[in-house]
Image (cartoon, coloured by chain):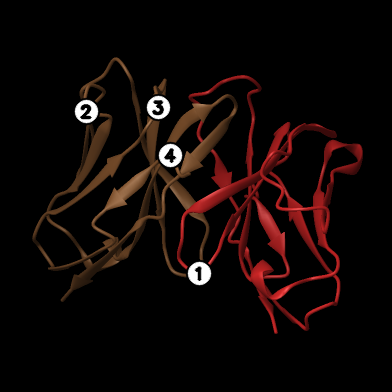
Chain colours: A brown, B red
Amino acid sequence: SQQGEEDPQALSIQEGENATMNCSYKTSINNLQWYRQNSGRGLVHLILIRSNEREKHSGRLRVTLDTSKKSSSLLITASRAADTASYFCATDARAQKLVFGQGTRLTINP
Amino acid sequence: EAGVTQFPSHSVIEKGQTVTLRCDPISGHDNLYWYRRVMGKEIKFLLHFVKESKQDESGMPNNRFLAERTGGTYSTLKVQPAELEDSGVYFCASSQLTGASNEKLFFGSGTQLSVL
């Protein structure tokens, strides 16, 4: 069974709006990472948050982590057309390998 | 610095044929991973090399899949014979540190495999 599950599966918003994606996981983790995949490209690492952190920022990205609820959220502020992509959370539930969810497909409409 | 490269980018084969995918990791990266994404579902782990040794191959679907990493450089993933359910995008990723669970992965663009 998959460790990470992203919600929603698809999200469509207008350019300039904020986009929020959620990730839930099942087992204890040391850290959680978010990746982005543009169509036809590989996954690109966005941000890592450790289990003892509650919030982390990187540019227009804000990630939160609630280990009591086993969930994380990724907020993209002031969205742009270039943010259109699939977003995946990944956890280190198994030693030395990341476990991914099925992703959230984000579409930014001009 | 070159990133992770995968070849081919696309492959269309018939059921029963053999296909070999190649991955060149970032130079100096000891860790090499293969992942697969089928039909928009989750990205599933296949196996992990540390240098030329298979560290974890628990995600390999069955014995039709064979991965090698001769000399600890590039890796190949062979599917023989291919079945319809093998269709999907095969990603390769590499990383530098061994045993570091907080290390980010560098991914290739993937090979889109279609088995007809």
**Which residue is the site of mark 2?**
A69
Res B85 → quadrant: bottom right
- The answer to whether the residue labelled 4 contacts the one labelled 3, judged by CB atoms less than 8 Å apart, is yes
Q: Find residue B84 and report its horizontal and vertical position in percent.
A: 68, 75
Sequence-earlier tag: 3 or 2 = 3
Q: Which residue is mark 1?
A: B39
On the image, the x and y values in percent for residue B101 come to 53, 23
Label pair 2/1, CB-CB below 8 angstroms: no
Q: Is residue A24 left or right of residue A41?
A: left
Report in which chain the residue with disc 1 lies: B
Q: Which residue is mark 4?
A: A3
**Residue B65 position by quadrant:** bottom right
Judged from this view, the residue extending furthest toward the left is A17
Check if mark 1's residue and mark 3's residue have beta carbons within 8 Å. no
> Badge 3 is on which residue?
A27
Most foreground residue, A95 or B74: A95
